[in-house]
Image (cartoon, helix red, strand yellow):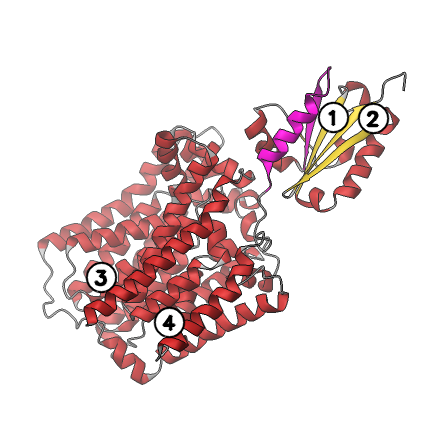
Amino acid sequence: MPQRTNVTWLAGGGLVLVIAILLRLPGLGEGFWIDEVISVETARLALPDLIQRVGFLDVHPPLYYLLLSGYTEMLGEAEWVVRVLSLVLAVGSLALLFRWGWRRSPWTALASLLLMALSTFHAHYSIEARPYALLVLLTIAMVLAYERFLDAEETPPLGSLVLLLVETGLLMTHYCGAVLVLALNVHFFTCRKHSARKLVRWGTVQVASVGFYGGWLPLLLVQYLYLPAGTFAHLSNGGGLLRTLLPFSLAPVHPSTVAAWIGLVVLLAAAFVATIRAFLPSVRRQSAAMLAPPSAGSTLSLRLLVAFAAALLTCAASPVISVAAVKVSDTTLPLLLGVLPATYALCVASLGLIAVAGWFNLRLLPRGHNVQVEAFCMPLLVLGLAAVAVAGKGLQARNAIGLLPFLCILAAQCFTPRRLVSAAAWISLVVGVALPSLSRQYAAFEPRQDFRGAARVVESFSRLEAHGSSNFVLPMWDRPGIEYYLGKATANGLMTPAQMPPESLLPDGVNVVLTREAYENSGDYLSAFRAVLGQRFALTGATPLREVVVAHFQRISQGD
């Protein structure tokens, strides 16, 4: 009978997964917006150029671009093909979330899967050619690998290797991944006493992770110390705490603003209640049963000591190897050499913290707290991301998307129905609240400009001009988005209409593409362009698209 019940739960999870895929499929056909254009153009580069570009000009570590590079090399760069990669990663994260919840209970597995499957936030970034789907996948994979390591009385080398690979992958996908790694370390060293062997195994993984990440650390320090305006701009434009929190709502763009905020408050309240309950003595005793007792043996094998020594050697060698291997110029090489001492100082400080934490666990920790990882780490993640937000004076919600699986798991544990009727009512309520949000444009997130549609409109306007036309994009940051579809050197970037060339140097047709703040105030900007171009040009058309307006100005002939 239990086996049949498990099949029912698994069938329910499979149905939710299929629904999640169907909800995300319509977005595959969208054209790229500027960030996705950057992703694809970065992935086109040869490996040395890719690392150089990401290291000195991008806002994320290189793992997603490397993955996208190999993927597009095999399958091409069509929009839907590129987006399928993110969709596959997103579906994988949903499957892993179900597995994570299953370790708690079948209901937690199904409820958490439903919450994230219907999340407009997750759906939006499930089909975007950016690293956020990979970030969510590796966040969940990291927790599962960690729990497997924690529960095993004697972790096999393969388990340690998987944990190392996932942790390094997380760190090399997004800088906010370091917050989760720190939170899991705090949980490991405080949840219960470990044997010396277990501590050395964990320490080996952490030291090796520091070593591998140390190869990227010189580039990160150059970004932080010398290129902060471009590199960390995405962390300094969050728009306030409420704007950061709203995307986590069950229905962030619900037709009713009240429903959107209620969806957020209810979800946060459920997660808060589950977190508080997890710290209660009765629940902690149940959680302790999930943790294996400390290993009986405390002797350290030669193989384990060799692995630890190899990890230390990696820490010592990786920064120098990175600086020697990365493609540099006369400007960037002195910068990299200049940050090497700081790189080694950070590595040594990290190793020192690991050693102190291990000594604390072995000698001073009385018993441990035995709190489940999601309840213990959620407050730490919030505090860590809050610190990032304070340091950067803001935090875009997408950079905190790794919190979403924790929120779903905790909210799912707040309520466990005793009858089928109550379960059906809960599911119906969630679906009823979430679907209106999913069916609308994702206004709560970074807008995706329709550059493909804009390029087609520009081409249609240009065909009307026998003597050619010029294309201008305002603001200039979005010029590569238009050129991705029109071709290189086919557009000019502007920051204000006053930067338009003199009328005498312009052809008979002028196409103006307005995005971002220019799109939001397109009427004012078009009036400004009329004033700059003067009486010799007339506005003959303005086509509004998704987050883009394309306007055409035509020279008035002498006869007119």
Residue 310 in the image: above or below residue 471: below
Which of pointers 1 and 3 indicates the residue nearer the eye? 1
- The tag earlier along the polypeptide, 4 or 1, is 4
- In the displayed structure image, the side of residue 459 where residue 126 appears, left or right: left
Residue 54 in the image: above or below residue 283: above
Residue type, label 1? Val
The image shows residue 30 at horizontal and vertical percentages of 53, 40
The residue that mark 1 highlights is 510
User: Residue 461 falls in which quadrant of the image?
Assistant: top right
The residue that mark 2 highlights is 537
Q: Measure the alpha-carbon separation of dots 1 and 3.
A: 63 Å
Region of the chain picked out in magenta, as a range: 449-474
Res. 212 in view:
yes
Q: Measure the alpha-carbon separation of dots 4 and 3.
A: 18 Å
Q: Measure the alpha-carbon separation of dots 1 and 2.
A: 9 Å
- The tag earlier along the polypeptide, 2 or 3, is 3
